[in-house]
Image (spheres, rainbow, N blue to C red):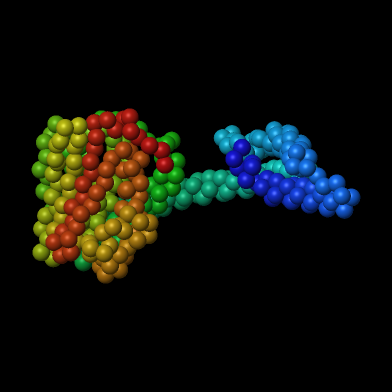
């Protein structure tokens, strides 16, 4: 009602200005006729039109009330006049066009998703064949060539995994299975996948955690996160770096997996942006080519699984990555 009266202020002011004008003309005419209007007549001439105005505004508010009430359903009310009828027709047309555009974009997105999935799986086959061929001919090539090719194949494999998981993340709610798993076994499995990288870079894992620690998570998605963290720890290791430390902190209702390296570390001006998409920072440009998507996807995955991912770092000292698991995560899973 308050907003309605605010909108009707111009009409009300115009109405009373006309009343004043008419009463003023009537008073002048009466004075010319030597019979001026009394105060009671003037009041009456104000009260009567005001009553009619109140009735008119009440009827008008009744017709437009639906437009002054918050509509949670999003349905456009029945228009009380032709102007609003035209607005409704235009809105309906725009809504229809927008829905058609959204549907078209969904179809295009699905085609892109299917293409990326198919392409990644097709590319994985030749990568596996190249890897097996390299292993077979290991003795026929120089050690430097062997390690160089192995490193390039690993980077290619990681790039394919990055593209695959990025596309799968769009349909995360259809592609995850939460279960209880042994954290140390998972960490050991991922470390085993990087065995060649550890040896090649002369930096080795140090695992210090109990065998009994069980967490609730999706092993496939967590494996991807661990792959990104370990890959970065190896990639940004220094010549004098010799260890990457894996440990666990247990608190009531929480388990924290801590992965600490002694590498180059992240510059202070970059730390708060490391989860931004495509952000590579100074390290990404100075050492090796980086997509800037690994930690971004890792953060999204951890958020979706209900884990807390945090990174602290000091330049030339090292980086510490903490993944916090909660015993109530089965109730806190969110959809992207």
**Which residue extends farthest right?**
33
Q: Residue furthest front?
A: 34
From the top left corner, tell me how far across and down residue 228 is, in percent.
Answer: 28, 51
Quadrant in the rendering for residue 221: top left
Snapshot quadrant of residue 143: bottom left
Name the foreground residue: 101 vs 220.
Answer: 101
Whole-percent x, y for residue 269 in the image = 26, 64
Across and down, in percent, residue 268 comes to 23, 63
Question: In this picture, is 286 found above or below 34?
Answer: below
Q: Which residue lies at the image location 79% right of the left edge and 51% below the top edge?
A: 24
Q: Nearer the viewer, residue 276 or 185?
A: 276
Q: Is residue 227 visible?
A: yes
Task: Name the residue located 26 percent from the left edge and 70 percent from the top edge.
Answer: 286
Identified at 16% across, 32% down, the residue is 252
Say left or right for 47 vs 300. Answer: right
Between residues 295 and 288, which one lies in front from this camera angle? 295
Q: How many marks?
A: 0
**Residue, x 35% and y 61% (percent of image)?**
279
In the picture as drawn, the residue positioned furthest to the bottom comes out as 286
Measured as percent of width and height from the top left, residue 48 is found at 77, 37
Residue 156 image-quadrant placement = bottom left
């Amino acid at each position: 009602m308050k907003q309605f009266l605010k909108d009707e202020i111009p009409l009300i002011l115009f109405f009373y200005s006309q009343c004043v004008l008419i009463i003023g003309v009537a008073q002048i005419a009466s004075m010319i006729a030597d019979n001026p209007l009394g105060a009671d007549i003037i009041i009456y001439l104000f009260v009567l039109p005001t009553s009619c105005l109140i009735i008119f505004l009440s009827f008008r508010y009744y017709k437009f009330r639906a437009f002054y009430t918050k509509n949670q359903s999003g349905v456009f009310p029945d228009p009380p006049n032709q102007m609003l009828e035209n607005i409704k027709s235009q809105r309906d047309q725009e809504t229809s066009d927008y829905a058609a555009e959204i549907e078209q974009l969904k179809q295009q997105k699905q085609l892109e998703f299917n293409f990326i999935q198919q392409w990644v799986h097709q590319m994985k086959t030749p990568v596996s064949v190249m890897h097996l061929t390299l292993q077979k001919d290991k003795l026929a090539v120089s050690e430097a060539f062997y390690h160089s090719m192995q490193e390039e194949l690993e980077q290619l494999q990681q790039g394919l995994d990055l593209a695959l998981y990025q596309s799968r993340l769009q349909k995360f709610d259809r592609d995850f299975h939460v279960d209880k798993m042994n954290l140390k076994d998972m960490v050991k499995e991922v470390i085993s996948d990087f065995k060649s990288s550890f040896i090649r870079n002369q930096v080795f894992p140090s695992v210090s955690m109990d065998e009994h620690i069980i967490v609730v998570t999706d092993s496939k998605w967590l494996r991807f996160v661990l792959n990104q963290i370990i890959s970065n720890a190896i990639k940004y290791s220094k010549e004098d770096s010799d260890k990457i430390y894996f440990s666990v902190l247990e608190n009531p209702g929480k388990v924290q997996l801590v992965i600490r390296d002694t590498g180059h570390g992240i510059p202070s001006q970059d730390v708060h942006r490391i989860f931004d998409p495509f952000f590579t920072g100074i390290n990404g440009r100075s050492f090796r080519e980086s997509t800037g998507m690994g930690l971004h996807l890792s953060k999204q995955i951890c958020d979706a699984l209900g884990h807390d991912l945090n990174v602290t770092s000091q330049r030339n000292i090292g980086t510490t990555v903490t993944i916090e698991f909660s015993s109530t995560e089965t109730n806190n899973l969110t959809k992207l």
